Amino acid sequence: MSADIHSLTGAYALDAVDDLERAAVDRHLRECAPCRVEAAEFAQAAARLADGTWSVPPPRLRDNVLASVATTRQVPVQTPRRARRGFRSRWVAAAAAVVAAVGTGTAVFTVQEQRVLEERTVAEAARVREAQVQEVLGAPDVVLRDQSLSSGGKVTVAYSRMRDSGVIMMAADAPPANGQVFQLWTVRSGEPVSEGVLASGQTTVVTVVHGMASASVVGVSVEPPGGSAAPTVMVAGVKTI
C-alpha cells in the first residue's frame, strides 16, 4: 500500500478522515497488522486524555498529548470549513482547466505536487503546535482542570499564567445531533471569544490558546455548522481563575 495510507492511521483513530479515506484505511487495516496495532495505540492514547480526574499533571500527560497533537485535527478559528471547501473547489476547477490544456499526464503531476506541498505544510504546523503544547505542559506553574461534557465525554484545560497560554483537549463521546458542531470558547473580561469551530462529526481536538492570563473560563458549546458569534447551548465550562 502507499505511504499515504500508512500516514492516515492516527487521523483514522481520531475520526479525523473523510468517508473515502476511512474506507481506504478500513481495507488497508484488514491487510496490514502493523497498522492495526498503530491505529489501536492511537485510539488508546486519545481515550487516555478523557480518563481520570487530575489535580496535578500526571507523569504521562505530556507524552500522551504530544503523541496526539500531531494527528488530531485542529480547529480553524478564522477559516471555516466552508471556506476551505470553496478553496478546494476553485483548485479542482483550475486542475480541470489544466487537463484540457496540456493533457492528463501534466494534470496528474500537478495534483501530486500540490498534495506534497499540502502535506509539508500540515507537518510543519504540527511541529509548531507540538512545541507550543510542550512549552505549556513544561511550565513550572502549569495547572490542569477538567469537566465532563453534559453530552458525554470530557474537556481538559492545561494552562500556564507564566507562559500566558493554555491547551484545550476535548474528547466527546459522540458528535452533536442534527448536524450541529462543537465550538470552543474563552471568556475574557466577561465576553465570550471563539477559539475555533470543530468540523461536522468531529469529536476530538487538541488546540493551543494564547492570552490565557485574561481568560476566566474555557467553554464548549453546541452550535449550527460554521459556529456562532456567541455561545448557544453550553455543554461544559472550565473555570481558570
Image (cartoon, helix red, strand yellow):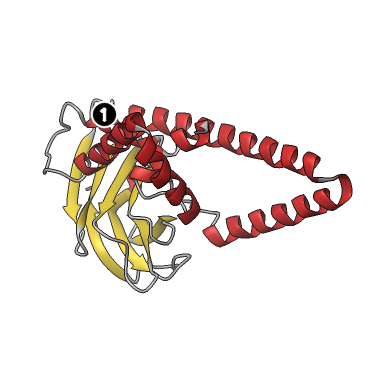
Q: Report which quarter residue 164 is drawn in.
A: top left
10 vs 24: above or below = above
Q: Is residue 188 visible?
A: no
- Which residue is most to the bottom? 178
Looking at the rendered structure, the number of numbered marks drawn on it comes to 1
- Which residue is most to the front? 31
Residue 52 horizontal side relative to residue 198, left or right: left
Q: Position of residue 222 (x, y in %)?
A: 33, 67
Q: Residue at x 21, y 55 (%)?
A: 153
Residue 211 horizontal side relative to residue 148, left or right: right
Q: How crowded is the residue under tag 1: few (<14 C-alpha within 10 Å), some, or many (20+)?
A: some
Q: Position of residue 24 (x, y in %)?
A: 46, 46
Q: Residue at x 44, y 39 (%)?
A: 8
- Which residue is most to the right? 101
Q: Secondary structure at mark 1?
A: helix
Residue 53 or residue 117, whichever sits in front: 117
Residue 59 or residue 38, whichever sits in front: 38
Q: Is residue 92 visible?
A: yes
- Residue tagged by mark 1? 62
Residue 33 horizontal side relative to residue 27, left or right: left
Residue 84 or residue 155, whichever sits in front: 84
Q: Residue at x 34, y 46 (%)?
A: 14
Q: Position of residue 45 (x, y in %)?
A: 25, 36
Q: Position of residue 168 (x, y in %)?
A: 31, 45
Amino acid type assigned to the residue bearing label 1 in the image:
Arg
54 vs 132: above or below = below
Q: Residue at x 41, y 45 (%)?
A: 27
